[in-house]
Image (spheres, rainbow, N blue to C red):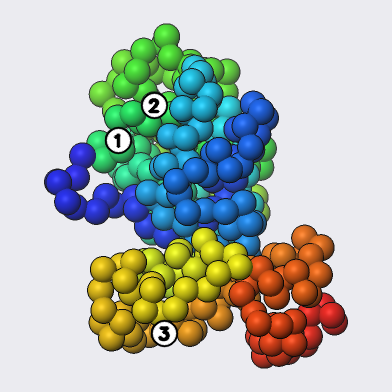
Amino acid sequence: MPPTGARPFWDYPRSPAATRNLVDAARDRGFGPDACLEGTGITEADLTAPDAVITGVQELRVVRNLLALTKDPAGLGIEVGTRYQLASAGILGFALLSSPTMGEALSVGLRFSQLSSTFHHFTLKVGETDSTFDLDDNDVPTDVRQFLLERDLMAIAGIVPILFGGAMPAGARIMLRTGPQTPLRLLAELLTVEFDSPRNALVFPTALLAEPLPTADPHTAALCVRQCEELLELRRARSGVAGEVRNQLLRLPGHVPTMGQVAASLHIGERTLHRRLAREGTSYRALLDEVRETLARELLRNGLSVREVSDRLGYSEPAAFTHAYTRWRGMPPSAR
């Protein structure tokens, strides 16, 4: 565990895609989204907003809510992990698919791990005969450690065959610290599993690192890596005060707090908030615009009228919302 007061490495801005899987698993068991999202500040609309990000702490709260609601049934992490799709990783998923070789795909995955939804610290150890892709969970809270290990290992077990054209590569196996009595024994249906091992890891022949991937496209890979760099930079910029302000604004529909109210909730003065946002290259007004645009696109896509969206986003009248939408998108909401 990280030192007291230290921010865990996994508490970075992330896509809500993995959280959607958690909410879907709860829904399948008869629990609505509100129960699963309780105490997170996340709304159901946030889960499908195109540019939405949440924090690791928020996702972890959803995990705990799910486990509490369902009484933590054995193998729930396995089931949630099977819901993971490579496309859910967004541009990172395309970067992996288009990588020239398995080795380069792993390098991209490690470099941009903060564009994923993992809570594990990954390391690649290259040996003469075999190499290992380790999943270190020492910083993962113990109450969710088993669930997240199940989820991430099942996700990895689903991704690797996709990279290789549909089949698990020969010689690949999983090392697990747990014994065969755990739900992770189900992994043995996909590949060889070594239980009671010194670490959790995917093991594979080192020769696979040079194996060309069937979907390789060096030009596309380079473009995707560049977009991964830009997205990671943007998310990191939103992980400071700007991220906290944005998260507060996303909670609102119908009520827009003043900058002073947001500053007070952060226990700082309004001028201090202004200075800190300026240092991060943004402003309260810019963040409010960003959040409103994201929510407006989602609400309109879900069939709400211009008046309803205007009310939800705190505009005084539909004309004011229409003017703002035209400024954002270059066309009025009626022409979308």
Q: Amino acid at mark 3?
A: Ser
Question: In this view of the protein, can residue 224 be seen by the observer?
Answer: no
Label 3 or label 1, whichever lies nearer to me, is 3
Instruction: Name the quarter where the N terminus is drawn.
Output: top left
Compared to residue 203, the image places residue 262 above or below, namely below
Query: Residue 146: which numbered mark, if any?
Result: 2
Please tell me which residue is depicted at 54% across the width and 39% down the height of the picture. Answer: 36
Q: Alpha-carbon neighbours of circle 3 within 10 Å: few (<14), some, or many (≥20)?
A: some
| Dot placed on the residue nearer the N-terminal end, 3 or 1 | 1
Measure the C-alpha gap from mark 2 to mark 1: 10 Å
What is the residue that sits farthest to the right in this orientation? Answer: 335
Judging from the image, what secondary structure is the residue with disc 1 in? loop
Give the camera-side residue of 36 and 114.
Answer: 36
| Dot placed on the residue nearer the N-terminal end, 2 or 1 | 1
Query: Would residue 213 appear left or right of 56 to someone viewing this image?
Result: right
Residue 225 coordinates in the image, percent (x, y): 50, 67
Q: Amino acid at mark 1?
A: Pro
Give the camera-side residue of 266 and 296.
Answer: 266
Query: Residue 141: which numbered mark, if any?
Result: 1
Residue 4 coordinates in the image, percent (x, y): 14, 46
Please tell me which residue is depicted at 27% across the width and 50% down the height of the picture. Answer: 8
Q: Are marks 3 and 1 in contact (CB under 8 Å)?
A: no
Please tell me which residue is depicted at 34% across the width and 53% down the height of the picture. Answer: 11
Measure the C-alpha gap from mark 3 to mark 1: 35 Å
| Dot placed on the residue nearer the N-terminal end, 2 or 3 | 2
Query: Residue 283: which numbered mark, if any?
Result: 3
Q: Amino acid at mark 2?
A: Gln
